[in-house]
């Protein structure tokens, strides 16, 4: 009976083959065998230390030559897929007969029995479908392949092309994806694992079912032993090993830096080449720094969400709903996250290379790059540029400035009671210090003093310096901009800060790509080497600001970096940044090699919580990153330019100190003691004071407050301005003549009745003699009427409505309304990132 069935099968097969033999041979002959080597190959992204950082691909594949394929992997694949690989010439008759019998019994094609060469033919030429005709065409193509390639080349093409599950194509991508190593480094157990999953890569992937993957591995090891390719001890040892695999990652868009690199590569070489040609992309990114930045940002923002004053969505809440939506297939319909966001960018001071780029808290939740695209108020992080302008014009860190309420004293438009008023300091214990040095004003982030310095230096001059420093975003020409109310990108702010460690110059623009190479090392694209750096400040000015920022980090608003957040003892400087109403928290700082800016806030601007200063949210992240950077790139002390000299200054006068510069103060015990009022400052010859102190010694400048009542009777009524604090405006307010914030232009309205009177006076009329006589009267009455008329015509100052009506109230609102972070990037932007869009990846 079996012989009869076999004869029947063979006879039928012979007839079927003879009928279509000529047609199928001709079809197989038309296929271009060069396509076997035309595989989409993932482009590999390398960090600055040539470590793999990510990939760009349509199919995640990295081809390798046969010599780099481990012998155990080749043997394992042969054992499982094609035991007669070295004996057949493209197809195996025994396998075909076995499969044909089972398929006839089943009534349809159930078993393939394809050799490795047939699988290569099917995958290369898309010979899909389970029909006898397709199977015969596959055999003819396999025969052609065997005629043109040796067995080693066929195995190389096969192992570089086949799918291993998890979005991984080819042995090299599979080895790196599952085990975090190159294929030539795989162990026997790992080779058997890859071979075991070929029959059903998604079902047998260790990411899908670890137990099933282990069983498939052990079967492959058993087959290798049965074929004499490994001995019993090696087989048993490999089967006993635990299956250790790495965490699954979407290598194409695993973080914001990789996504931005992908965009830049596509811009450089085009989409098709970037996705298919397997380039090696050399970048400026430091993989270790990037990892530290991502982890620190997540950790510290998690802590911020635990603050008692935080009453918004948390990352954990959104992540839970996102996972649920993802499992149900509705992730694309999820609303955008509303939890606290953050961003980081770090630059090489000398080259402008981007070492760190974190565009948000979770790339999977939202791909919007806040480090490059979001424009937010810089807050008090803008202050160093104000002082740089003033120092460039002749002021110096020892120049005295008044830190006291501005213009309308107690009412600070839009301020907060006792904390971060518009013109108050960046401190919870809000107070004004009176007359202080410019150094103290910057170190303590004194807003009132800063506005005075900025207005004296010139608002236009400050804005011009900001633009020269690299801030291309539009800055509003109002005093509020001196305190960072205008929106800038984090990348612009970081670039602007590089002028201080660089001695007054900066690179033209940051970059993240170094070069793109083919696999043989041929350079196909390279970042243009633009050596035309931009000079912004004199070296002496840059160092003066740097010395103030060093003090700001050591003793000012950033001092908790060392006392609480573990910043190690290396030369560094920086400045906190807090925007109005605590909507944005920043810290920007640097060492001699590296400048880093950190931001925290919401995509839709709103208060984080009261007291969310930059030193609380952004500074700890900055400290973590800087510690790692300092360990990898040893910072050095920034040298003082020879044009700066030390000079002893009296804090009371801002002039040259004398031996009489002492104040009498009360000690802790109540005794009167003499206290020296001088300190050592730095200045250029042009900035240096030339006159001795005129507060101590002779001649002495008289102080009105100290004058006797007989000489200045109102002196004793002078208010102590250091006790005046900003308050919040909670109702319509009568604006003073000088609005300190310049938030609105005062307008005058004339009553309707008065308008009619004025109109009548302006309208020419004919007056007869009797009317003229009636208008005459007593001179005194005429004078009184005239005065009353003048009083009626005086403009009436009105409070500005909360929502002014354009037709009746032409108010020019100057208060910064934060720009939505999702706005399109304007022309001329420093760095452009594409609008986030779904990227193609495997469907798992």
Image (cartoon, helix red, strand yellow):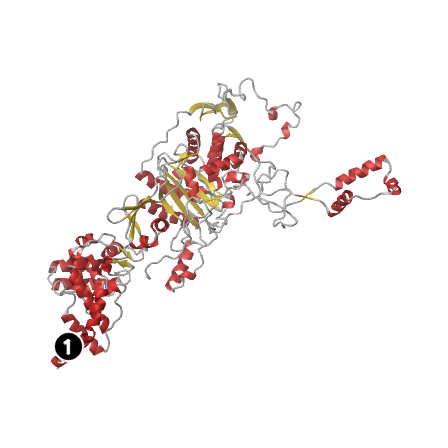
Left or right: 525 with respect to 15? right
Reply above or below: 209 against 780. below
Reply above or below: 381 against 298. above
Front position in the image: 808 or 451: 808
Q: In percent of the image, x 53 and y 20: which residue is there?
A: 696
Front position in the image: 29 or 147: 29
Is residue 445 visible in the rendered structure shown here? no
Left or right: 49 with respect to 680? left
What percent of the width, then of the height, locates residue 10?
15, 77
Position of the C terminus, as image quadrant, is bottom left
Front position in the image: 339 or 755: 755
What percent of the width, then of the height, locates residue 40?
28, 57
Q: Within the image, what quadrant is residue 504 found in?
A: top left
Q: Residues within 10 Å of mark 1 (few under 14, many from 20)?
A: some
Front position in the image: 111 or 341: 111
What percent of the width, then of the height, locates residue 274?
32, 52
Q: Within the image, what quadrant is residue 811 found in?
A: top right
Q: Residue furthest top?
A: 698
Q: How many marks?
A: 1
Which residue corresponds to mark 1? 10
Q: For mark 1, give the secondary structure.
A: helix
Position of the N terminus, as image quadrant, is bottom left
Reply above or below: 438 against 258. above
What percent of the width, then of the height, locates residue 479?
55, 38
Left or right: 422 with respect to 247? right
Left or right: 713 with respect to 19? right
Is residue 272 visible in the rendered structure shown here? yes
């Amino acid at each position: 009976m079996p012989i009869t069935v076999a004869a029947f099968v063979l006879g039928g097969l012979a007839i079927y083959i003879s009928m279509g033999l000529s047609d199928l041979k001709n079809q197989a002959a038309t296929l271009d065998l060069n396509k076997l080597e035309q595989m989409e190959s993932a482009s590999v992204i390398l960090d600055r230390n040539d470590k793999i950082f990510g990939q760009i691909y349509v199919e995640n594949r990295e081809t390798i030559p046969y010599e780099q394929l481990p012998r155990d992997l080749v043997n394992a694949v042969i054992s499982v897929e094609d035991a007669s690989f070295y004996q057949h010439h493209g197809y195996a008759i025994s396998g075909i007969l076995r499969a044909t019998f089972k398929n006839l019994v089943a009534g349809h094609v159930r078993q393939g029995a394809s050799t490795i060469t047939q699988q290569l033919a099917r995958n290369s030429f898309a010979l899909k479908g389970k029909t006898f005709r397709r199977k015969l065409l596959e055999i003819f193509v396999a025969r052609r392949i065997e005629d043109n390639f040796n067995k080693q080349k066929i195995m190389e093409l096969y192992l570089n092309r086949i799918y291993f599950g998890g979005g991984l194509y080819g042995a090299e991508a599979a080895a790196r994806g599952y085990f975090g190593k190159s294929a030539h480094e795989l162990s026997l157990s790992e080779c058997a694992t890859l071979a075991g999953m070929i029959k059903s890569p998604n079902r047998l992937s260790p990411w899908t079912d670890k137990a099933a993957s282990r069983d498939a591995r052990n079967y492959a090891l058993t087959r290798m032993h049965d074929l004499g390719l490994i001995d019993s001890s090696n087989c048993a040892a490999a089967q006993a090993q635990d299956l250790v695999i790495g965490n699954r990652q979407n290598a194409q868009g695993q973080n914001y830096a990789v996504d931005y690199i992908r965009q830049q590569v596509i811009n450089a070489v085009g989409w098709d080449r970037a996705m298919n040609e397997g380039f090696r992309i050399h970048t400026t990114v430091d993989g270790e720094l990037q990892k530290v930045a991502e982890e620190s940002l997540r950790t510290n923002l998690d802590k911020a969400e635990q603050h008692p004053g935080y009453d918004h969505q948390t990352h954990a809440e959104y992540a839970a709903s996102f996972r649920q939506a993802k499992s149900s297939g509705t992730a694309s319909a999820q609303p955008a996250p509303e939890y606290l966001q953050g961003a980081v960018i770090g630059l090489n001071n000398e080259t402008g290379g981007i070492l760190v780029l974190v565009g948000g808290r979770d790339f999977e939740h939202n791909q919007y790059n806040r480090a490059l695209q979001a424009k937010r108020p810089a807050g008090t992080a803008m202050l160093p540029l104000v002082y740089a302008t003033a120092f460039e014009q002749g002021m110096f860190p020892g120049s005295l400035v008044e830190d006291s309420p501005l213009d309308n004293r107690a009412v600070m438009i839009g301020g907060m009671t006792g904390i971060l008023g518009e013109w108050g300091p960046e401190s919870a214990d809000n107070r004004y210090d009176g007359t202080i040095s410019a150094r103290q004003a910057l170190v303590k982030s004194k807003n009132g003093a800063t506005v005075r310095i900025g207005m004296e230096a010139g608002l236009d001059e400050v804005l011009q310096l900001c633009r020269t420093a690299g801030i291309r975003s539009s800055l509003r020409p109002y005093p509020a901009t001196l305190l960072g109310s205008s929106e800038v990108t984090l990348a612009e702010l970081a670039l602007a800060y590089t002028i201080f460690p660089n001695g007054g110059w900066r690179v033209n623009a940051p970059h993240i790509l170094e070069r793109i190479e083919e696999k043989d090392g041929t350079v196909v694209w390279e970042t243009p080497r633009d050596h035309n750096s931009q000079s912004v400040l004199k070296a002496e000015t840059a160092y003066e600001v740097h010395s103030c920022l060093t003090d700001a980090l050591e003793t000012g608003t950033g001092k908790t970096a060392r006392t609480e957040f573990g910043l190690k003892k290396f030369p560094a400087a920086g400045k906190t940044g807090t925007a109005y109403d605590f909507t944005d928290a920043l810290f920007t700082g640097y060492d001699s090699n590296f400048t880093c800016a950190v931001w925290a806030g919401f995509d839709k601007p709103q208060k984080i919580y009261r007291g969310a200063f930059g030193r609380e949210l952004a500074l700890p992240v900055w400290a973590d990153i800087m510690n790692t950077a300092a360990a990898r790139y040893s910072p050095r002390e920034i040298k003082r330019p020879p044009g700066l000299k030390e000079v002893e200054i009296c804090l009371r006068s801002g002039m040259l100190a004398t031996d009489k510069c002492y104040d009498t103060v009360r000690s802790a015990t109540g005794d009167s003691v003499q206290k020296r009022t001088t300190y050592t400052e730095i200045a250029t010859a042009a900035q240096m004071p030339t006159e001795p102190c005129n507060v101590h010694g002779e001649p002495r400048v008289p102080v009105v407050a100290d004058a006797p009542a007989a000489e200045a009777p109102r002196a004793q009524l002078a208010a102590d301005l250091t006790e005046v604090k900003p308050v919040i405006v909670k109702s319509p307010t009568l604006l003073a003549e000088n609005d300190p914030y310049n938030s609105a232009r005062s307008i005058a309205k004339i009553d309707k009745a008065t308008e009619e009177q004025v109109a009548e006076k302006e309208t020419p009329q004919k007056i007869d003699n009797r009317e003229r006589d009636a208008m005459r009267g007593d001179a005194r009455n005429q004078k009184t009427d005239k005065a009353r008329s003048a009083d009626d015509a005086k403009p009436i100052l009105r409070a500005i409505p909360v929502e002014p009506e354009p037709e009746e109230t032409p108010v020019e609102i100057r208060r910064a309304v934060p720009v939505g972070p999702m706005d399109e990037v304007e022309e001329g932007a420093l760095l452009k990132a594409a609008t986030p869009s779904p990227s193609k990846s495997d469907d798992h």
